[in-house]
Image (tube, rainbow, N blue to C red):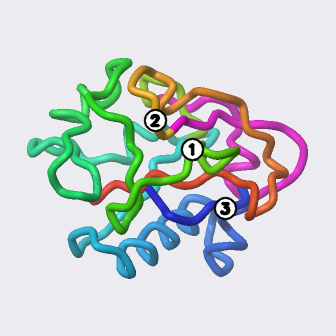
Amino acid sequence: MTSLTYEANFATLGNGSLGLWGADKLCNTRAANGKVPAGHYIALLSTATTDAIDRLPDNTRGYVLADGVTAVASSKADLFDGSISHGIDLDENAAPVSFAGNARYVWTGTSANGLRNGTACGNWTSTGAGSVSAGQVDAVNGGWLAAVGAPCNLPTEAGPRLYCVQR
């Protein structure tokens, strides 16, 4: 998960990229500056036409936190079965994140089963009206992906974070 919070318009934040690509750029920038293994990272997000579950690799090694040790799920199927082994509560520096305010939430646009849930703030290109599913970093039930509806117009300093997964 990113140490920084963001507004919902990842096209702007990703230097003119499309929404998902902009979010992926942000994930790769944070990873390159963090303590996670080198590689390509993608944002765990859904859009109106893309399900987050389809963006993730079927990682046979399982999914772990940024500390490289703490297990979250044993497989992609386990990741999206309604519960995870541990909340995703470490950032790219393997540091614990704040549970204060919106800093405890993560943009997802995704239901607990990994499928899209709504229009995802104009496919992550808008900070206009509306809301989108956001996960909660300390949840181990389906709330890790869909705990609340976050308003699309939250500013960066009040916005949720991103989950980033190594491809």
Query: In the rendered image of this protein, does residue 34 appear above or below residue 138?
Result: below
For the N terminus, the image quarter is: bottom left
Decide if residue 155 is on the left or right side of residue 165. right
Q: Can the viewer see residue 75 in this picture?
A: yes
Q: Secondary structure at mark 3?
A: loop
| Residue 17 position by quadrant | bottom right
- Where is mark 1, residue-wise? 99
Query: In the rendered image of this protein, does residue 16 appear above or below residue 48?
Result: below
Circles 1 and 2 in contact, beta carbons < 8 Å:
yes
In magenta stretch: residue 118? yes
Circles 3 and 1 in contact, beta carbons < 8 Å:
no
Q: CA distance from mark 1 to mark 2?
A: 8 Å
Q: Indicate which disc, 1 or 2, sits on the residue closer to the N terminus.
A: 1
Circles 2 and 3 in contact, beta carbons < 8 Å:
no
Q: Indicate which disc, 3 or 1, sits on the residue closer to the N terminus.
A: 3
Residue type beneath disc 3: Tyr
| Residue 74 position by quadrant | top left
- Which residue shows up at 45% across the image and 29% down it? 139
Q: CA distance from mark 2 to mark 3?
A: 19 Å
Residue type beneath disc 2: Asp
- Where is mark 3, residue-wise? 6
Q: Secondary structure at mark 1?
A: loop
Query: In the rendered image of this protein, does residue 122 appear above or below residue 147?
Result: below
Q: Which mark is residue 138?
A: 2
Residue type beneath disc 1: Phe
Point out the stretch of residues depicted in magenta. 115-136
Decide if residue 14 is on the left or right side of residue 155. left
In magenta stretch: residue 72? no
